[in-house]
Image (cartoon, coloured by chain):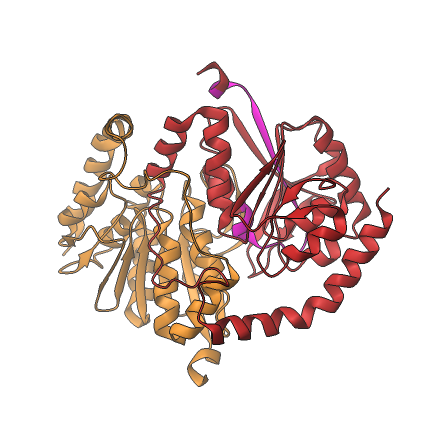
Chain colours: A red, B orange
Amino acid sequence: VAEVVRAFPVVFALYPHVTQLDFTGPHEVLARLPGAQCMLASSTGGDLEADGGLVFTRVRKLADIERCELLCVPGGFGTIEAMEDQELLTQLRRLARDARYVTSVCTGALVLGAAGLLQGKRATSHWAWRDALSAFGATVDDSRVVRDGNVLTGAGVTAGIDFALTVLAEVAGDAFAQSVQLSIEYAPAPPFDSGRPELAPPAILALSQQRYERIRPARDAAVQRAAARLP
Amino acid sequence: VAEVVRAFPVVFALYPHVTQLDFTGPHEVLARLPGAQCMLASSTGGDLEADGGLVFTRVRKLADIERCELLCVPGGFGTIEAMEDQELLTQLRRLARDARYVTSVCTGALVLGAAGLLQGKRATSHWAWRDALSAFGATVDDSRVVRDGNVLTGAGVTAGIDFALTVLAEVAGDAFAQSVQLSIEYAPAPPFDSGRPELAPPAILALSQQRYERIRPARDAAVQRAAARLP
């Protein structure tokens, strides 16, 4: 119980065109931890518009945050630019040094990679992007939540909820995590079984892959530039 | 395809102390529909702070929105006050008249009920609150997503994602909904199986019920006052 009520600052490190469910899911779970202080932060602070049009306000500047227990980088199409935001990468490296957990959801793993935080680590990302992690010295793992030391990475978007419950169980115990699962009625019942490439109907997977192929050149160029800057 | 690209305005009707995942989940899914215009709106407009501390900005005034295809009321502890916000209830009744879908997630169903929009309908809500719906003339159903005519209600918090995929399939077809499920990698794998009262360990359920018992008197008083105002 002492563990539970200790201050537990959580920083979600954001950037333009982030996918909001990547962090709103974990935020909903982690904010229920007594002692949690969940903060949104970005390179510039201020308002931040996520993909889909949701606008968050009172976003802090990463440079103004002294330290956190858990650092989480969500994903989104803005990842391609975020991998080249040197202020973001500098602040991620600084906060990661003292954090108990260094984490990502979805393509946020590519930003962790660009910051040099995945070297020699097993990690995952969105199914259509995870192959890119090897350029950052990571070993790609296709599990939904991957832990290697204090680095936890989640797969695409909705994996953030599973990731957050996993963290909560570690920080506050299984019983507390189970009580939060009950309070958010997390007994998922998707109307289809199409949530992973191995499960989706082949025609749907093919269409989806076509869309990702169109952004692959820009993505790969950004990954190569970021990887070249690593020590 | 013509169906898909038609304008599809979606209004999430918010109020203070809303549970953000109740609407950020469906927002992430529905914003991917070509033609979707997802709007946050409240009685007053402006900034809105959700439970857990996330602050949304550029929230519209409900009275300024002419009509929508889908009206969605999310839940949260603020439901108790929202049931007595006459401006909110008036605007919900007005928007519901022309909406193709009148919907809620979690305890948002109690606000729909207070607006008189669940009379004679089957509906669901968060497992700890759904019994209250009968006061509004609804028949309680414990399914995760319940449809009765054009009224769709979802169970607690995370049921909003399943609800939104159900709507998406109706509006844009199964294949499109499956492609969105794949893009958000929605193949949930909770680390525990504690998401419904029937599944949770008895000690966890008992603790959770104790917490809900503490707010039951305030909740029931608000329900009774709201129900007494219905025609």
Q: Is residue A177 above or below residue A27?
A: above
Give above or below for B112 relative to A115: below
Side of B151 relative to A135 (left or right): left
- Above-or-below relation of B19 to A215: above
Q: Which residues are magenta?
A: A4-23
Residue B16 figure quarter: top left
Query: What x and y, as percent, mark residue B106?
Result: 31, 48
Q: Quadrant of the C terminus of chain B?
A: bottom left
Quarter-of-image position of residue A81 = bottom right
Task: Tell me: B55 left or right of B168.
Answer: right
* Residue A167 magenta: no
Which residue is at the front of the view, A181 or A65? A181
Q: Is residue A201 left or right of residue A111?
A: left
Residue pictured at 74% horizontal, 44% vertical: A43
Residue at (45, 56) in percent of width and height: B186
Which residue is found at the position 68% from the left and 40% from the top?
A121
Q: Is residue B44 visible?
A: yes
